[in-house]
Amino acid sequence: MAGLLISRRNLLLGAGGVLATSGLPLHMAWAEEAPRGGRLVVAADSEPRTLNPAIVASNGVFFIASKVIEPLAEAMMDGEGGLAPRLATSWEGSEDGLSITFKLREGVTWHDGAPFTSADVAFSAMEVWKPLQNLGRVVFANLDTVETPDAHTANFRFSAPTPIQLIRNALPVVTSVLPKHLYEGTDIAANPANKAPVGTGPFKFAEHRPGEYYRLTRNDAYWGEGLPKLDEIIFRVLPDRAAAASALEAGEIQLAAFSQVPLVDLERIANVPGLKVMTEGYEALTYQLVVEINHRNEILADRKVRQALSHAIDRDFVVDTVFLGYAQAATGPVPQNAPQFYNPDVKPYSFDIERANRLLDDAGYPRGEDGKRFSLRLLPAPFFSETRQFGDYLRQALGKVGIDVTLVNNDTPAHLKAVYTDHDFDISVGSPVFRGDPAISTTILVQSGIPDGVPFSNQGGYANAELDTIIDQAAETIDTEARTALYNDFQRIVVEDLPLINVAEWGFTTVARDTVLNVGNNPRWPVSNWADTALAS
Amino acid sequence: MNRVAGRLMRSPEGVAGFCLLVLLAAMALAAPLLFPGDPLVIVGRPLTAPFTDPALPLGTDRLGRDVAAGLMHGARTSLLVGLATALVALAAGALVGTVAGLAGGLVDEALMRVVDAFQIVPGFLLALAFVSVTGASLPVIILAIALGAWTGPARLVRAEVLSIRERDYVASARVIGMHPAEIALREVLPNALPPVLALTAVIVATAVLVEAALSFLGLGDPNVVTWGSMIAEGRNVLRTAPHLSIVPGLGLVATVLGVYLLGEGLADAMAGREARG
């Protein structure tokens, strides 16, 4: 996990495929007529230590590597199951949930000319995704073997029933296929191809100048007909966020994704002729703003106190001022843009100071003579300026109901250690990611029995037998409807009992030149393969 | 003393510095009266422009906090950190310097090597490391900045002591059987201090700037408002709301300038020189 702590972008972990809520952007219609050729220059705010998305399935790695290395399937705005086939053309789960069969695309070659076969998929699954990958460890925990009856069929066999729904939702994120012939028999984590990846994608990795740029060039042998459109993609390393905005205005770069242009600059940038601000393309990359709670603190162990905290937060104010409107108030642990799972019938927590005060009085914490009830230590996560700002707001909001809050600021490693290893906090502000399926990285936030030190998990000492049962049951429920129903219960209980408080959910923004076509046309656009992205002449 | 004060008041630097500092001190003292309560409280619409709302003369920041309240309360923090750091640094420096100067020999050698060790590490880095390890609170920050500032006074005091201990009145004190500690505190230290006081201005000014820099980097105490943290907040909206950085920035400029000018005037006055120009 230590490797994930290095840069902020590495914390932006990937998300699974989700049916998108918004329709197709208008310019999708031009996809076919988009001109060929040209060089796209993109801002990159960090240089990941590895470019191997099969090991580190994080958005920072995908941003560059997804153009080179492809998954079995990619998320899609609409279409069957919200998935577009990539290296697999079809997938089918067995009735008992113990096997899934993938038909693989024929006539695909690796960038070095070797043919792509089912052996590559079997090798990636058994040697990389299951044992080494941050998310694959969870999703493929019960994967036993991968059989390859012929060169273009891979049959995944599981030791326990595994929901096809979960695998489908996880496909875009966890199934980046590596070339077996380059990795077999080597130390996979130290293979030189991790820095200069070889894949089947629309672009070949050309070079990396540390501190300057990454260069990808067109793969002329790509399997997609007439694709890719671009000749070259350059990722210019621009760690300073203010620099990306200026570089866009000056025309040095044509695109900046992942909100690299700060929110406060967007209004100004949107008025610059030739630049467009877009929020499309992040539908499956939803970040959640949450208040994590240490239930070891006996005051916070009282449900009434937690409910009072939730009532004391003005979610609309947070969306409008901290996120300047580029977010949505949250109702529960599953974001609203995941309609497959989202349960709208949960108890809402209105912004109601009187109610919060009453709940705190009822809980047995009346205001003292100085107007204060009790004191809490708040650790805002330093990952985003928004998490810090929300910390500042939360201190004020809780002060209004008589809770004296002391802020403790830490850098990223110290924050992770304090919250997830030492449990040295009362409340903290966190930013977990919803990755298309609650089982991937959401249930872990409230499940009990997680060892100390696992970041972005329940480290608040919360234990609820009812919730644990539902989570375990859902993990083995094959029937999609029954599984979804279980997760509806999961949301209802989390919102009622508040092991953590969901405040808002947000995506990111892309700023691009008008000449860049086909931007944001799939729900994980910045981390997809950009085969149809083009430049208008 | 009166003579020094008189000379100070005749030097333009001294007068300007004195006025600036009196103004800032008045701001710091009046802050809790004019803006009672927590200056970090959200009082209005976020990003209100200055001079548009009479209740919020300098506007509000991104969360709707009063910039004027921040400026006034920030003066408290800055001056407090500056003065407290100078006090700690002077006390520690004077102690080490006197002991080293009077004891001489091995003790002197050992103490001076410790001073060397602290002097070769840039003060800001030392403070940065100290705060990031121990966590930020006002006393820690004061200590952290003093950690890099006490070596100057220590060296200066030692040099003074070395010359003073050879004077006749020290010898006579020794002859009448005064305890060495008494000699150090009663006879030597008071006479060694004046030149060190001239260094105070530099220490205060540095401390104010280092504290602002720490806050700017997010290592300040997040529970009090400081000019550094206000500038850091404002930096994100520099293109759209520059006043959020400019207002506390002016406060910093005024403080450092005031301290420097007063220090300059004081040094001149104590040296018996008349104001130049």
Image (tube, coloured by chain):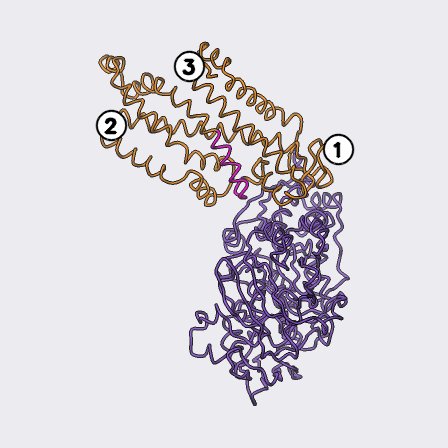
Chain colours: A purple, B orange
Q: Residue at x 67, y 51 (%)?
A: A263
Pointers 1 and 3 in contact (CB under 8 A)?
no
A161 is higher (above) or lower (below) than B92 = below
**Position of residue B156 in the picture relative to residue B54 (left or right):** left
Q: Is residue A388 magenta?
A: no
| Amino acid identity at mark 2 | Gly
Q: Looking at the picture, how far across and down is residue A101, in whole percent?
A: 62, 84
Amino acid type, callout 1: Asp
Pointer 2 chain: B
Dot 1 or dot 2, earlier in sequence: 1
- Do the numbered discs 1 and 2 sit on residues whose CB atoms are within 8 Å? no
Q: Characterize the local packing of mark 2: few (<14), some (14-19) or many (20 or more) Cα atoms within 10 angstroms.
A: some
Q: Does residue A320 lie above or below A459 as drawn? A: above
- As drawn, the label of residue B273 is 3
Q: Nearer the viewer, mark 1 or mark 3?
A: 3
Is residue A473 visible in the rendered image? The answer is: no
- Identify the magenta region: B205-220
Q: Regarding mark 3 in the picture, which secondary structure is present there?
A: loop
Q: For marks 2 and 3, give the one nearer the viewer.
A: 3
Label 1 sits on residue:
B53
Q: Main secondary structure of the magenta part?
A: helix
Q: In whole angstroms, how far apart are the C-alphas of marks 1 and 3?
A: 50 Å
Q: Earlier in the sequence, mark 2 or mark 3?
A: 2
Q: Position of residue A18 (x, y in %)?
A: 69, 69
Residue at which label 2 appears: B104
